[in-house]
Amino acid sequence: MLKEYVDVLIIGAGPSGCVSASYLHKKGVKIKVVEKTKFPRLVVGESLIPRVMDHFAEAELFECLDAMNFEKKLGARFIRGEEICVFDFSKKYGEGWDWTWQVPRADFDNTMAQEVTRKGIDLEFESEVISVAFEGKNSTTVVKDINGNFKEIHAKFIIDSSGYGRVLPRLLDLDTPSKLDPHSSIFTHVKDINRPEGEEGTLISFDILETQVWLWVIPFSNGNTSLGVVGPTDFVNSLSENKDNREALNNAIKLSDYYIRRFAGVDFLFEPVKLENYSRSVKQMYGDGFALTGNSSEFLDPVFSSGVAFATESGMLAAKLYLKESQGISVNWEEEFTGYMKRGIAVFTTYVKEWYTGNLQTLFFHQPEDPDVKRKICSVLAGYVWDETNPFVKKHDNLIKNMAYLIEMESNKNQKKPSN
């Protein structure tokens, strides 16, 4: 059997894998990337948040992506009937990027993968991991290529960026149920023939159909738009008696007063894809000789577009900690990797949970707006969830709940006041 020897094997060529590979390559580390699929390929996660831009810049991937002229995302809009709340990333609390992109992921991921290859990194498509064995930190991974040939890849460290493939969680029995309630989504792309001119046509929007059910609208610079419905799995399944994803998505669009005229009857560019019970978690995020990054470790919910940001954050961090360790510097993976990532994940987990209870929606749509509160929440939505000078990060586990309670109490008190 053919054998290859590398410093780091990276499984998966999505954003997390490409950020890890590009960063380590520029530091002189010998890399091998294996990717099960052939690019370009369809994948969900088309709305980014500003924190990812830090990672693309540091990994020297920003320029190739910027040259693609993807739709700029300057903020996000939330719609609830007649009520509208717009977050502008340039009006957030603290430092950091104030814009990002809305991207067809097939083109976006392919651009990064081609750049990684151009840099001289060994990236092998249509190469599937069959087994992994560890001896201390050193690993032997058997992969099968498109022709059915097997080979061994010997590595000092593995970064598993396999996303929904979840290679190491499956092979090492690391999967564990998510703490979030089961939700599902159905999505497709459409030719946005009724797209309005100006900002209205390009703004990413989340249209709340019921407290726990929402429609996403993500316009791309190529004239297409991503449309998806998200809700509790039982609700999403009830949208079509025949379990027909096309019928289900059409029925969801009909529930939107805001978007029915723009999207009713528009042709779908591919058969709608269903992601059922999408939230994921793991028993551990690292072990001797490996780290799990991106969706291979944890996936929360698409409502605040945090998926790619956690993928690139963990991919960059795993690369830096491996590099530190390879230089003979002691690394406390539990604190420096798991502890750090879990702090950010905990913040977004609270925001996802409080979105579905309705408490966060109460804050979003409360009038008159409190500009200071809005700036601090905006910073969280931009992905700066490790900035503990922001009380909406530091006190995330009770601040939203308490503020929503006070707003409701005030509202009830005002309703009881006798009219003159």
Image (cartoon, rainbow, N blue to C red):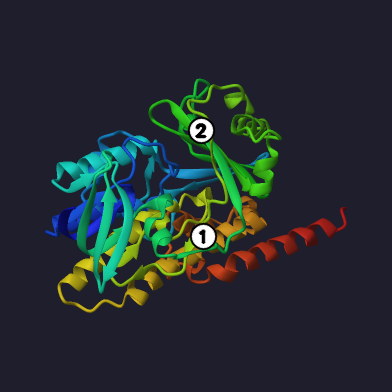
Left or right of 420? Residue 250 is left
State the residue position of label 1.
372
Residue 28, labelled with which disc? none
Against 270, residue 139 (above or below) is below
Q: Is residue 361 visible?
A: yes
Q: Position of residue 321 (x, y in %)?
A: 25, 68
Q: Position of residue 329 (x, y in %)?
A: 19, 77
Left or right of 142? Residue 377 is right
Q: In front here: 352 or 394?
A: 352
Q: Position of residue 185 (x, y in %)?
A: 57, 43
Left or right of 393? Residue 312 is left
| Residue projecting furthest to the front | 1
Rounded to the nearest angstrom, the CA distance separating label 2 from label 1 is 37 Å
State the residue position of label 2.
188
Crowding near pointer 1: few (<14 within 10 Å), some, many (20+)?
A: few
Residue drawn at (25%, 71%), measured in percent from left and top? Answer: 137
Residue drawn at (39%, 70%), measured in percent from left and top? Answer: 338
Residue drawn at (29%, 41%), measured in percent from left and top? Answer: 126
Give the quadrant of residue 161.
Answer: bottom left
Q: In front here: 188 or 390?
A: 188
